[in-house]
Image: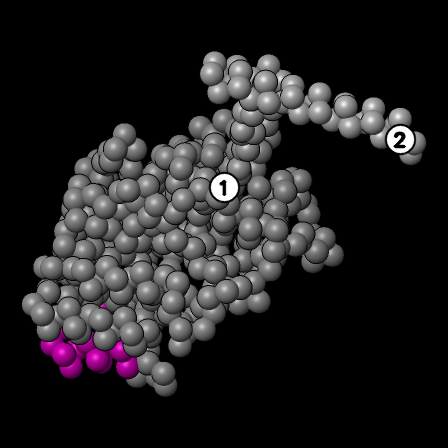
Amino acid sequence: MTRSTRKTASSATIIFLAILVLLGILYTVSGADPFGLFTPTQLTLTESPANTGGWWEVYFTDLLTINDPSNLSGSIPEKLIAFINNTQTTIHIASYEFDLTPVAQALVTAHQRGVDVRWITDDEAGLDADTKPEHGQFAMLQQAGIQVRDDGRGALMHDKFWIFDGQILWTGSDNITISGNFMQNNNVIVVHSPEVAAIYERQWADMWNGNFNAKSPSTVDQQIATVDDTPIQVLFSPEDNAIAHILPYIQSARTSIRFMAFTFTHDELGAAMLERARAGVSVSGVFETVGSDSQYSEMIPLFCAQVVVHQDGNPQFMHHKVIIIDDEIVVTGSLNFTANADQDNNENVIIIKNKDIAALYVQEFNRIWSQGHDPDPNKITCP
């Protein structure tokens, strides 16, 4: 570069800096920024939806990072223990099985400070199983003076719900077990609502008094609530014929139906989904691999009708019982999509119309879907 060229470049730099200074003074005095030099760039960040909305909380097991039963940090049982520790008056439980000692210890401590703790469980999977190795948690409760009752019948007491202080409901697909929280895919939804809690309290009291079968009168018309403009419907089996009340939600789907199913053999529910798929609704689902290619599974008619389905990728169990409709309605709880669950077992379902809650379940669906795989067509015989 010649001396003349360097001089010209230096002059240009000085002129540019002078213009920049003048524009800076203009922006400072008037706020004008004709070239966008000083206005900060607005970045749009895509974030995962929050797992709480004030009156509700949603949790999923995370098997990639939370899979050590000796370390409860960040786990669903850790959150459950926090609710137990904060309870002042009552903890009423209807839960199928149990083998988590830290939860038993928290319940004993709550009982010792005067909290009314009572548990309804299944006979075979609950109290009978408590004598097996690595169990004994129900015995811990009973030895501390906590009452535990089972259903004493052939069908399952398969409910999974907890009620704290008559104010807070905890439910979902999650059993309070090592397997349920550290090996399986499960979900929990917590609803802070005395109105919703009261619906579950009535059902809990009915079972505590020994009414486990379909002879119990249905109160389904009284099992509707609205919390912060969110409609909520609660269903119990066997008395409510729960799937009959789920079907209208399926049949009214406008854009999409997503489901995650541990067991799905209910023909009428499968037919309703197939009808919506043929009507142009996007239908997709993940089946727990074990048993999903049997002759009774709804995966076969859906797959043969070219509905997009996956088998899950968890080497243990994908234990969800979830349907998401139109990205705003979530159906979840303990109910597997089977006739036995609907007509014989004790089960609970909660249906919530809330886009923020649905977004979390869609996110979980997408995660489970990505870990799954297409069914093997060689194992399926289509009509």
Q: Is residue 214 above or below residue 323?
A: below
Residue found at the far right of this picture:
2
Residue found at the far bottom of this picture:
133
Which kind of residue does numbered mark 2 sit on?
Arg
Dot 2 crowding, Cα within 10 Å, few <14, some 14–19, many 20+: few
Classify mark 1: helix, strand or loop. Answer: loop
Q: Is residue 193 above or below residue 206?
A: above
Residue found 59% across the figure and 14% down from its top: 34
Residue found 22% across the figure and 80% down from its top: 139
- Check disc 2 and report the residue beneath it: 3
- Check disc 1 and report the residue beneath it: 47
Residue found 16% across the figure and 44% down from its top: 194
Front position in the image: 348 or 64:
64
Dot 1 crowding, Cα within 10 Å, few <14, some 14–19, many 20+: few
Q: Quadrant of the N terminus?
A: top right
- Are circles 2 and 1 on residues that touch, CB within 8 Å? no
Q: Which x, y percent locates residue 23?
A: 59, 18
Front position in the image: 341 or 158:
158
Q: Which x, y percent locates residue 344?
A: 32, 56
Residues shaded magenta = 136-152
Q: Quadrant of residue 70?
A: bottom left
Q: Which x, y percent locates residue 68?
A: 45, 73
Q: CA distance from mark 2 to mark 1?
A: 55 Å
Residue found at the far front of this picture:
3
